[in-house]
Amino acid sequence: MNNSNKLYLSKTEKIAYASGDAATNFFFKFFQFFLFYYYTDSVGLSAGVIGTMFLASRILDMFTDPAMGILADRTRSRWGSYRPYLLFIAIPYGIFGYLMFLNPQFSEQGKLWYAFITYSLMMMAFTAINIPYAAMTGVMTPNSYERTVLSSYRFMGAFGGGLLLTLLARPLVKALGGGNEAEGFRITMALFAVISVLLFWVTFWFCKERVKPAITQKSSWKKDFSSLIKNRPWQILTLSFLIHGCYYTIYGAVTIHFFKYWVGDNGEAVFLIFDFSTLFLATSLLSSLVGAGLTKNLVRIFDKRSVIIGSALLNGVVMTGFYFVANADYLTLFTLQVINGLAIGPLPVLIWAMYADTADYGEHQYGHRNTGLIFSAALFGLKMGLAMGGAIAGWVLAAYGFEANAEQSERSLLGILLCFSLIPAALAFIKVGVLLFYPLRDKHMQDIEAALTERKGELHAPSS
């Protein structure tokens, strides 16, 4: 058997790969936790309109995401197929991320168009850099377990970047804005944009691509999509990922609203420079960081499928519990949030590692590897979930009569609470039901790895 199947990555390369998701999450976690609040309470746009904007902006992704995956799969350079995009797209990614927060003094309609255009441009840059970045999981090593370990490092970087963003965002906004919240957001996100560019370059410099398609594989758009559509494990993962992005975004979008309007947190520091909402979000990310780090140990004992189902189930139970917690019971709120973070931590680690498994499965079943397209469709599912979650949060708050920076009625407070608890909890339980149909077990993947190694060894062997 070819020794490449036993390839293990150095800790330096794993940390370098993790830095790319830290760069991603300086913006992605902002989109989940702060962007809805920024548009409603800082820019002054209505919740319902913003919800619709989030969903409308995803129409373009239906075309750009698969196109980017196909393009990346066909890219050939001295750096590989996917790494070049980390080098060349990093600067546009940072620029578009910064432009989102300029907040020009237009009319309300002009502000909406500016938000729509800059958010859409940022999502295009997000696509162009993150699809190749995610696809690298499938080509840095052919070993399924090592990909899970790599994914664990990746999401420790993701949660670490998100934690840093969450801890510093509101204090920096307050300190740099001079009383102007929108200006504070602009300067703060400029700093994170610069750091993001540098971190993507670290990933480019220290990470390598090693897994190549079989030498007999012919490039064909029709075959790419045909093998993707027939890939049942990929279908199930993508549906579950869409649901995950949706419910996590609903919950994240209203967390600051929950503390501001339901709990009565006025943004004043309660511990050092941090207010309650910042500490609450940071608690989730810190415990998620621990959960992500523990994942590689869990999968030594349990099957990946079992771990991800158990984590999603616990996630749903905890979010149900938020509905029943008294608004001033901080101890219970924060205890539940610690458990919630531990449950969330393994979810992205495993789902991205399992996507790499579906690439192996597709190559094994149909003789065609399309790693970039598989990960582009995965990212589209996540972004669609992000958009749907933001849309649902906006529509629910609008339906319940929410008005930014005003005293809320009992009905509008109920809308915030439902978005914070029962609605995302219900979707988490639906995700569990979907994942029960996922067919690939770890033993199955070991057989697939061995078969692919043997097949590629025969193809590359010299003829007698």
Image (cartoon, helix red, strand yellow):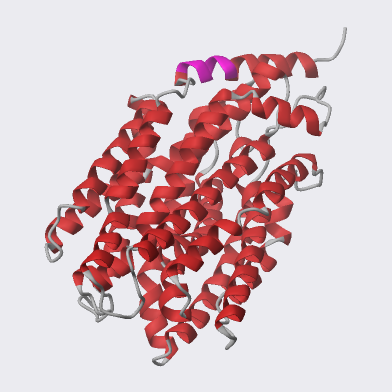
Res. 429 visible in picture: yes
Q: Quadrant of residue 135?
A: top right
Q: Report the residue that reaches farthest toward the top.
A: 464
Rendered view: 353 above or below 218: below
Rendered residue at 72%/19% (across/down) = 367
Rendered view: 167 above or below 88: below
Q: Is residue 103 magenta?
A: no
Rendered view: 254 above or below 40: above
Q: Is residue 459 left or right of residue 174?
A: right
Question: The N terminus appears in which quarter of the rendering?
Answer: top right
Query: Looking at this view, is 55 or 382 the one in front?
Result: 55
Q: Which residues are magenta?
A: 443-448
Q: Is residue 310 left or right of residue 384?
A: left
Rendered view: 107 above or below 167: below
Rendered residue at 84%/14% (across/down) = 462
Main SS of the magenta part reads: helix
Percent across and percent down for residue 151 are 49, 41
Q: Is residue 164 left or right of residue 422?
A: right
Rendered residue at 35%/31% (across/down) = 309
